[in-house]
Amino acid sequence: MSYAVSAALQAAVYQALAGNSEVAALSGGDIFDAPPAGPEPALYVTLGPERVRDASDQTGQGATHDFTVSVITEAAGFAEAKALAAAVSDTLVDAPLVLNRGRLVALRFAKARARRLRPGDQRRIDLTFRARVDDS
């Protein structure tokens, strides 16, 4: 197994989201590699947790990365968050990401969870994606 491609995958995902005009327009450009410090924007995207499993085989080192991209809003309902979440998903599914280390084999949507964090305060949609990478 190799975890070495993790940083390259994260950077490519961030660049894909930040470089997508629809995601940028819907989020107001508020796309973060980590939750923002200080006051939070009313609607934003942040990269979240990651779980990695070995996917090496006879041809080389590889891994499967399950990672989360979250859409968080202070809006009363989910409409804005769902529109932004759809744009995030459209941007990442089957995206031809170029990594500065390794190679992306596949990138798929795995699941989503929409919920209220605090009654009346925030809504959050966690989108989980599965990426298969090779480090050869």
Image: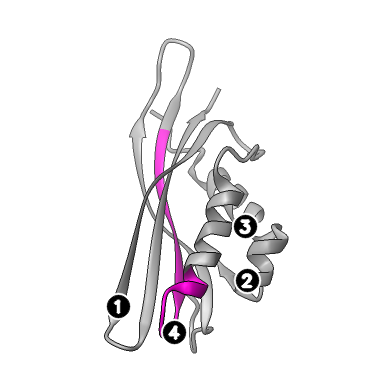
Q: Nearer the viewer, residue 41 or 73?
A: 73
Sequence-wise first label, 2 or 3: 3
Residue 45, percent from left and from top: 52, 68
Colouring rule applied to residues: one colour
Left or right for 109, reference 21: left
Left or right for 89, reference 17: left
Circle 2 SS class = helix
> Tag 2: residue type?
Leu
Q: Which residue is mark 1?
A: 117
- Residue at the spot x=67%, y=38% of the render? 98
Q: Residues within 10 Å of mark 2 (few under 14, many from 20)?
A: some
Query: Does any portion of residue 33 appear in the rendered image?
Result: no
Q: Residue furthest top?
A: 58
Query: Does any portion of residue 69 appear in the rendered image?
Result: yes
Q: Residues within 10 Å of mark 1 (few under 14, many from 20)?
A: few
Circle 1 SS class = strand
Q: Residues within 10 Å of mark 3 (few under 14, many from 20)?
A: many
**Quarter of the figure with residue 25:** bottom right
Question: Which stretch appears magenta?
Answer: 64-81
- Residue at the spot x=58%, y=50% of the render? 90
> Tag 3: residue type?
Leu
Q: Which residue is mark 2?
A: 26
Q: Residue 17 has which mark? A: 3
Q: Which residue is mark 4?
A: 74
Where 132 falls versus 81 (above or below)? above
Residue 72, percent from left and from top: 44, 73
